[in-house]
Amino acid sequence: MSDNDVNSDRSPTLTPPRKLPKKGAWTRKKEGNALSQQRVQNFRQQWLNDPTFKDWLLPDTNDLTKAKCVYCPGTSMVAELSNLKTHASTKKHLSNKPGSSGKTQALTSLGFQRGITPQNREKARAEIKLSAFFAEHNIAFSVADHLTDLLKEVVTDSKLIKEIELKRTKITGVIKNVLGEGHKADLAQKLQKNQFSVMTDETTDVSTVKTACVVVRYFDQEAQKICSAFWELYKVFKETPDAVDIPTANAENLYRALIDSFTNRNVPLTNVIGFGSDGCNVMMGDNDSVKTRLLRDFPGIIITKCVCHSAHLCASEACKQLPEGVEQLARDIYNFFKHSDKRLFDFRNFQSFAAVEPHKILKPSQTRWLSLLSVVERILEQWEALRLFFIDFTTNRAHRARADVRNRAVFILEKLSNPFYKLYFCFLEWSLPLFNKFNLEFQSEKVVVHNLHEKIRTLYQEILLRYLQREYVMRPNLGEINP
């Protein structure tokens, strides 16, 4: 009997394949060679009334399909009844549970339980103070693994020092769950009573996770001054169970995440009176942006673009009138030396011959706005030494270098030998301080918004004085001047 006959005989008796449900109703997971189906389960509020879960279960605010455990900080699990029951019986959960005989305790409690003794209170106070010291001075938490042992060895006559138990895991929990939550709660109470402004910006960290930082600015009644305080750092792209619905950093998602950060803490939105950010379209566009939504929901709100960002954009647009080779020359010089210690060593001989300081060549940065002037000044300082180095490289050592390296060296030497390129760099050295001085003025920690109009007026006049007659520029009404 052939294989075809066997298959034909079996086919009438086989169970028809089960139809998959519509996309979005189920998730499919690969187990070995088979595909299993699992329905997406959201967190249920009725679980909070269950005696088995009510003391320790909380919903995960970042993901509706997950739950968190109060006794196990940092634990996030899929919101399914079987997972919750399994977690409740784990050794870690039982040892962290208050009143258990296990060695590990919940980090948020820190010994503040019934029947606490004055000694335990002093121990907890010392651990919190040390954790605050680490956070305030941005000290690596791994240092705590050695600090407490060192203190016990050095301070031998202190009973309190001997009782301190503070390693990296505990100090992380104290800062996140005690100090962080306490500071957030205190700040939320102040924002509930005072009007405030909001500032936000997005960034991408080293792990390619895009986040948005929110800072609030308000008048502190206790300190009697205007304060800026960190409010929240949230993920722009949140993980969703439905792979079809891919999140995007559009205006609606950014605006909704910003508003939710305040409503989750019961901060009244009527207290929001100002908003500031950079000038990108998704934030400050006139049609579909965070700004248009704020103007729609908060009539009378004051919206301001980042002054430093706007000044940088003006300088960048002006620099586009220069030949592209000027900026490229600065990048090529840096790239030529950055990966070769031998070239740097040889360059020092030419620096000594040209009687210039042995300074390194700086890297032009797109994000550090104030760095461009430093790069220009450094190249002008090392101009003659650089020219001599590349003359020697292209004449005596070019035959030992690769073709691409040789071509780059020839290109750089041509620019360094062109007097017009040096003239362009001198022009940048003369003009960029205008914008750097203006940028530094508004990167101050002091309140300088009342100087904004006068500083912009002064900057505009100084630019005009570069190419117009002084009598014409120094008119009382700048609007009458035709630049």
Image: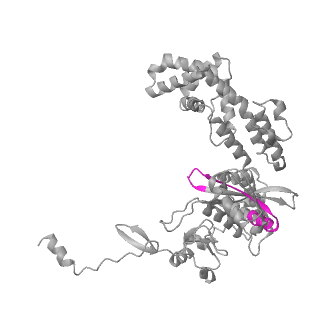
Answer left or right for 388 relative to 405. right
Answer left or right for 334 relative to 276. left
Answer left or right for 220 relative to 174. right
Residue 48 lies in quadrant = bottom right
Residue 70 lies in quadrant = bottom right
Q: Is residue 63 magenta?
A: no
Quadrant into which the N terminus falls:
bottom left
> Which residue sits at x=72%, y=29%?
430
The front one of 50 and 318 is 318
> Which residue sits at x=70%, y=29%?
429
> Which residue sits at x=61%, y=80%?
45
Residue 211 lies in quadrant = bottom right
Q: Please, is residue 164 above or below residue 205 in the view? A: below
Residue that lies at the very extreme toward the left in this rendered image: 1
Q: Is residue 352 visible?
A: yes
Q: Is residue 107 visible?
A: no
